[in-house]
């Protein structure tokens, strides 16, 4: 017995295309441009299954992007003024219209993209509607749940071709809910469902200019990225393009979120339900022809069951049906374009040339269109191209492991960190392994589960930022405290400066060393710099740190990984202890601040520093994760994990309070820190060495390297073992350089630009916004009772 053909009718979709003369303009300021004139540049949109042309789509110009941004800017105040309830009604209407026209959208998506109708009908459309429903709720609750935030403004959004409508929903729904207006660019290959969505925007009553859709090739995306009128960019696509965008936006002040490539591990332990795991593997790697950023393209199977599991995989592959994506009985449709087909073929043949075994099921693919049979590669080394490169096709690379520890090492042996699957009947084992995997999403005994309530996004070169959930909403919001920041760093009012007297503990000439791995260390270059007081008097020498010193500090930070594993209660205790020991020496630290800066309220800065340590100690065991209840039989646990090793360039003003305000939250959440203190007034930080030594802070959790902000920040931003860099010294050029250099490893950055920050203001120097910079959310999906 076999499946018979079950073709889906394309009558309504073809009629919709015909009604538009199969030529489409742009959707700007609530109206359509004319795409019929000879002067309008267009390009073809093709059906990947047979190569036939579906329609001609307009190639937008720079002037078109300018018009779209101007329209969005004019519309944004009115969209905000509509209020949360007003926006919620519009989002609800969009959700209802997506449901009403679900079959039309599904068929059109299949025609344009090549994925099977079962996927567009049963996965993409319901989830797209779900995002608009979910975010209608956030719009309604915004004034209550996000009272201390405002909309970013005008948002530029660029999506890929693998999930054209679903990516649109992921991006547009939260942006609209938060009060932003949008300039949206669909992928060149797959623009048609975005244009149909523009029509339902008109039906739903979306005000003119709130949603603008401009089509075209990469030149349109480049125009959006570089446009000065864009306040935030949200991009999903390749890691290579993500790097380009990060460099292009460096120093512009644009908010940025990137959801990039992946090479996700699919881990099968020997106690797993192997048959269920095989079905999960099918959903993980052969869903959407493997053209999925989170596809489980690296199969890792425990050695004792590896041969048996591989045989089961091959048997299942033999039953996968490849053919017309409009046939509801088929499992695998067409690749999006011949270029993609050629790329996949080249990578597979390269693996064959390297000695790997290539296995494909028996069968034929249609003659016309872009097709590729599901493929299994075995015998590849961990460093092989197919083991490290995102193939983005129906190609699985399999290998074995012996122990859970080895499985984690193999899983993390990639520059990516988007998603992972763990299969085991032991929930204890699965929940032990999941937090160790460096990925933003981990599915336990399931695969490719998504929901609007659960954030999605990656670590490392899979990008930063989250889509979905509360954390996804904050990507489209700005804390109101940011608007209150001073235009330049605040310089404390100086008192009368006195020369150091003979009985002062600071009259002895000394050189303050660096603090690395819990010990004072001489600078590698054996150079020092003189530090002078507010009146010009010599105070002390400090070590001049260099690239080697940063390398040593980063190495020490990685060795202190136990700090991240310590309980939040323990981390809080240490911070309280630091505060206690600082308070005991308050007079000494106040005298040092006064000697350096001449600040009138040096005592107040020490008092505020002690309070700030208490504040972040209090947060250490209060910044809990969440338990979501998505529409599956189970829960999704959102864990707030430390970022890792953070390089922090501290402000010059308020040398003690500024240092504590940045370092303490990073430590509170389990990060390890390489801190560069105030370049002008570093002695308040170097004086902390004894406080740290007597406060039970493990060696390497906090490392302090004094010296040039520019040189040391440059080294931190370029270092591939540093996970994030914060710079808040008021240097616009320096902050831009950090963002630009971070693009190579796509590390996270938090920079202050040329503006200052009132470090005494708890809203500007505290709150959840800082905690979000010091953490990253991992969503672990846990089904139960199945």
Image (tube, helix red, strand yellow):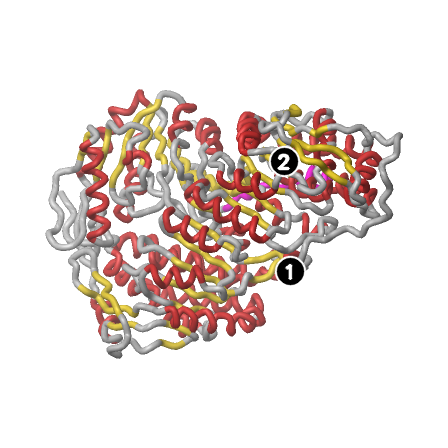
Q: Identify the image quadrant of residue 105.
A: bottom left
* Crowding near the residue tagged with mark 1, few <14, some 14–19, many ≥20 C-alpha atoms within 10 Å: few
Query: Could you tell me if residue 538 is visible in this image?
Result: yes
User: Position of 415 compared to 727: left or right?
Assistant: left
Q: Which residue occupies 26% across, 53% down?
A: 115
Which image quadrant: the N terminus? top left
Front-most of residues 253 and 148: 253
Horizontal relation, residue 299 to residue 786: left or right: left
Q: In the image, residue 540 lies at what x, y percent?
A: 75, 33
Q: Is residue 507 above or below residue 403?
A: below
For the point 38% across and 56% down, which residue is it?
A: 167
Residue ID for mark 1: 483
> Does residue 485 appear anywhere in the picture?
no
Q: Position of residue 236 (x, y in %)?
A: 39, 52
Query: x and y percent of residue 493 in the render?
Result: 80, 52
Point out the stretch of residues depicted in magenta: 613-628
Q: Is residue 712 magenta?
A: no
* Residue at 58%, 35% in the rendered image: 671
The residue wearing badge 2 is: 667
Q: Is residue 457 above or below residue 672?
A: below
> On the image, which quarter does residue 159 sit in?
bottom left
Residue 672, image quadrant: top right
Q: Nearer the viewer, residue 434 or 141?
A: 434
What's the CA distance linking mark 2 and mark 1? 27 Å
Image x and y of residue 709, in percent: 61, 42
The kind of secondary structure element at disc 2 is helix
In the image, residue 439 sits, relative to residue 701, either above or below, namely below
Q: Earlier in the sequence, mark 2 or mark 1?
A: 1
Assign the C terminus to one quadrant of the image. top left
């Amino acid at each position: 017995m076999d499946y018979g053909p079950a073709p889906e009718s394309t009558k309504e979709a073809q009629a919709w295309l015909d009604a538009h003369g199969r030529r489409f303009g742009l959707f700007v300021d609530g109206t359509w441009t004319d795409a019929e004139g000879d002067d309008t540049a267009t390009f073809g949109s093709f059906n990947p299954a047979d190569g036939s042309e579906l329609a001609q789509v307009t190639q937008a110009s720079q002037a078109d992007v300018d018009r779209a941004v101007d329209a969005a800017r004019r519309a944004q105040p009115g969209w905000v003024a509509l209020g949360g309830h007003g926006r919620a009604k519009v989002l609800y209407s969009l959700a209802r219209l997506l449901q009403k026209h679900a079959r039309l959208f599904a068929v059109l998506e299949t025609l344009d993209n090549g994925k099977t109708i079962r996927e567009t009908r049963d996965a993409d459309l319901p989830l797209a509607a779900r995002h608009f429903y979910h975010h209608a709720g956030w719009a309604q609750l915004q004034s209550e749940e996000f009272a201390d935030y405002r909309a970013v403004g005008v948002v530029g959004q660029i999506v890929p071709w693998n999930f054209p409508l679903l990516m649109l929903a992921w991006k547009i729904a939260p942006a609209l809910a938060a009060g932003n207006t949008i300039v949206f660019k669909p992928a060149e290959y797959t623009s048609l469902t975005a244009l149909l969505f523009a029509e339902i925007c008109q039906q739903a009553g979306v005000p003119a200019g709130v949603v603008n859709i401009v089509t075209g090739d990469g030149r349109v995306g480049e125009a959006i990225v570089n446009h000065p009128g864009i306040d935030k960019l949200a991009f999903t696509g390749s890691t290579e393009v993500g790097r380009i965008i990060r460099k292009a936006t460096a120093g512009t002040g644009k908010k940025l979120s990137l959801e990039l490539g992946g090479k996700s591990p699919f881990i099968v332990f020997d106690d797993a339900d192997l048959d269920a795991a095989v079905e999960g593997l099918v959903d993980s790697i052969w869903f959407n022809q493997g053209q999925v950023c989170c596809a489980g393209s690296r199969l890792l199977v425990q050695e004792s069951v590896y041969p048996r599991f591989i045989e089961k995989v091959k048997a299942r592959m033999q039953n996968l049906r490849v053919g017309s994506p409009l046939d509801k009985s088929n499992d695998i449709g067409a690749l999006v374009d011949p270029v993609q087909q050629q790329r996949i073929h080249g990578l597979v043949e390269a693996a064959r040339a390297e000695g790997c075994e290539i296995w494909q099921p028996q069968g034929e693919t249609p003659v016309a269109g872009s097709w590729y049979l599901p493929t299994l590669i075995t015998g590849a080394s961990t460093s092989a191209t197919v083991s490290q490169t995102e193939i983005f096709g129906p190609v699985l690379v399999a290998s074995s492991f012996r122990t859970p520890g080895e499985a984690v090492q193999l899983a993390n042996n990639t520059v990516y960190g988007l998603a992972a699957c763990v299969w085991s009947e032991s929930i204890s084992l699965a929940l032990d392994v999941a937090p160790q995997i460096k990925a933003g999403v981990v599915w336990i005994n399931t695969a490719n589960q998504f929901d609007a309530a659960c954030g999605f996004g990656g670590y490392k070169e899979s990008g930063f930022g989250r889509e979905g959930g509360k954390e996804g909403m904050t990507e489209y919001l700005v804390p109101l405290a940011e608007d209150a920041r001073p235009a330049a760093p605040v310089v404390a009012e100086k008192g009368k400066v006195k020369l150091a007297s003979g009985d002062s503990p600071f009259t002895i000439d000394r050189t303050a060393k660096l603090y690395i791995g819990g010990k004072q260390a001489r600078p590698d270059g054996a150079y020092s710099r003189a530090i002078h007081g507010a009146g010009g008097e010599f105070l002390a020498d400090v070590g001049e740190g260099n690239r080697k010193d940063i390398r040593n500090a980063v190495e020490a930070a990685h060795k202190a990984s136990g700090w991240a594993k310590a309980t939040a209660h323990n981390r809080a205790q240490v911070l309280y202890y630091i505060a206690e020991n600082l308070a005991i020496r308050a007079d000494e630290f106040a005298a040092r601040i006064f000697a350096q800066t001449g600040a009138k309220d040096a005592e107040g800065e020490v008092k505020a520093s002690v309070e700030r340590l208490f504040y972040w100690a209090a947060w250490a065991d209060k910044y809990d994760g969440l338990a979501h209840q998505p529409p599956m039989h189970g829960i999704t646990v959102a864990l707030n994990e430390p970022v890792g090793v953070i390089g922090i360039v501290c402000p010059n003003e308020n040398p003690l309070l500024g240092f504590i305000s940045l370092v303490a939250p990073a430590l509170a959440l389990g990060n390890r820190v390489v801190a560069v203190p105030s370049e002008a007034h570093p002695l308040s930080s170097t004086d902390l060495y004894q406080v740290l030594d007597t406060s039970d802070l493990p060696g390497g959790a906090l490392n302090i390297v004094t010296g040039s902000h520019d040189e040391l920040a440059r080294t931190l931003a370029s270092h591939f073992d540093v996970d994030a860099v914060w710079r808040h010294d008021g240097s616009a050029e320096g902050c831009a350089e950090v963002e630009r250099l971070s693009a190579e490893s796509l590390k996270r950055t938090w920079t202050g630009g040329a503006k200052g920050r009132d470090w005494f203001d708890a809203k500007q120097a505290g709150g959840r916004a800082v905690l979000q910079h010091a953490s990253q959310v991992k969503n672990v999906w846990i089904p139960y009772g199945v």
